[in-house]
Image (tube, rainbow, N blue to C red):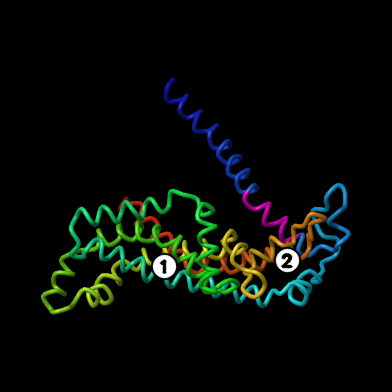
Amino acid sequence: MRTRGMRLGNFLSLPVRIVVLVVLFAAILFPFYWLISNAFKMEQEYYHSPPIMFPSKLTLQNFQDIVLKYGLPRGLLNSVLIATGTTACTVFFGSLASYSLVNGMLPRRLKKLFAGWFLIQKMYPAIVVAVPVFYIIRTLRLMDNVLALVLMNTSFNLPLVILLMVGFFQEAPYEVEEQSMLDGCNLLQRYVYVTAPMVRAGLIATGMLTFVASWNELLYAVILTIVRAKPLTVTIAGFITDKALVWGPMAAMGCVVILPVLLIMWLMQRDFISGVSAGALKA
């Protein structure tokens, strides 16, 4: 009797699981479909009631407008420079710092103090330090400069990268490091030629997380830019005004913004998943 009940429960659970998966799948994909469909709609179709789910006629006018009227080339260049610069600086300095915390000659209490300090940095919202950051950047004459956003994004992403990379370096086999010490390698040489290749998955995973975070960053991009250094996120926010929403160009710009992230995640998904899985096992 119990076996029959279990079989019946398993039989009933399969349709339920399928329904749940379909609902979740639709909830995730529908915003993307709505964004893409709006990017190809004509202007009068945005205000139709009830909403038009499928464009009656595909148009590229919105994409032409964001290139010619709304500064897509400049914004895309700024976003690429900010995201790549932040990723390079964060992964480089963060991995060096985490490697030093694990294999450096610092006292154990000092290592714990640094680790606690990095953790505290992730506990307060970024808006808390917006005013002092604004004054510092203005004093350094870096307003409306890509370098200012690279510095800010690096400072906010660095603690997380350090904390994540500490786990990867702790699991790297220390015997290989000892052998390199006997061969005469200094600390930097051991990091570059021995340990870093062993934690490649962790470097890729943290690098991708940093890239996505800096690519989507909006708060300090709004505060520290005016015209010249505006990334795409600020341009999209500018389509929302007190009078109306510029639906077509906003949707077209949104398609451009998500495309690089989706492409990178698709090309490097194996390394990203292996890095995240390894980090979860280490945790």
The residue furthest top is 1
Instruction: Check whether the beta carbons of the residues at disc 1 and disc 2 lie within 8 A of each other.
Output: no
The label number, if any, that marks residue 64 in the structure image: none
The residue furthest bottom is 184
Residue 258, given in percent of the width and then of the height, sits at 62, 64
Residue 75, given in percent of the width and then of the height, sits at 65, 73
Q: Which callout, 1 or 2, points at the residue further toward the start of the chain?
A: 1
The residue beneath circle 1 is: 90
Q: Quadrant of residue 205?
A: bottom left
User: Badge 2 local density, few (<14 within 10 Å), some, or many (20+)?
Assistant: many
For this rendering, which residue is in front, 47 or 131?
131
Q: Does the stretch in magenta take in 126?
A: no
Q: Mark 2 is on which residue type?
A: Ala
The residue beneath circle 2 is: 252
Instruction: Please report the residue visible at 55 percent of the width from the left and 39 percent of the height from the top.
Output: 17
Which quadrant of the figure contains the N terminus?
Answer: top left
Left or right: residue 274 compared with residue 101 = right
Instruction: Please report the residue visible at 14 percent of the width from the left and 74 percent of the height from the top.
Output: 181
For this rendering, which residue is in front, 126 or 276?
126
Left or right: residue 139 compared with residue 251 = left
Left or right: residue 119 compared with residue 216 = left
User: Badge 1 local density, few (<14 within 10 Å), some, or many (20+)?
Assistant: many
- The range drawn in magenta is 28-37
Q: Secondary structure at mark 1?
A: helix
Residue 257, given in percent of the width and then of the height, sits at 63, 66
Q: Does the stretch in magenta take in 34?
A: yes
Q: Secondary structure at mark 2?
A: helix
Residue 247, given in percent of the width and then of the height, sits at 78, 59
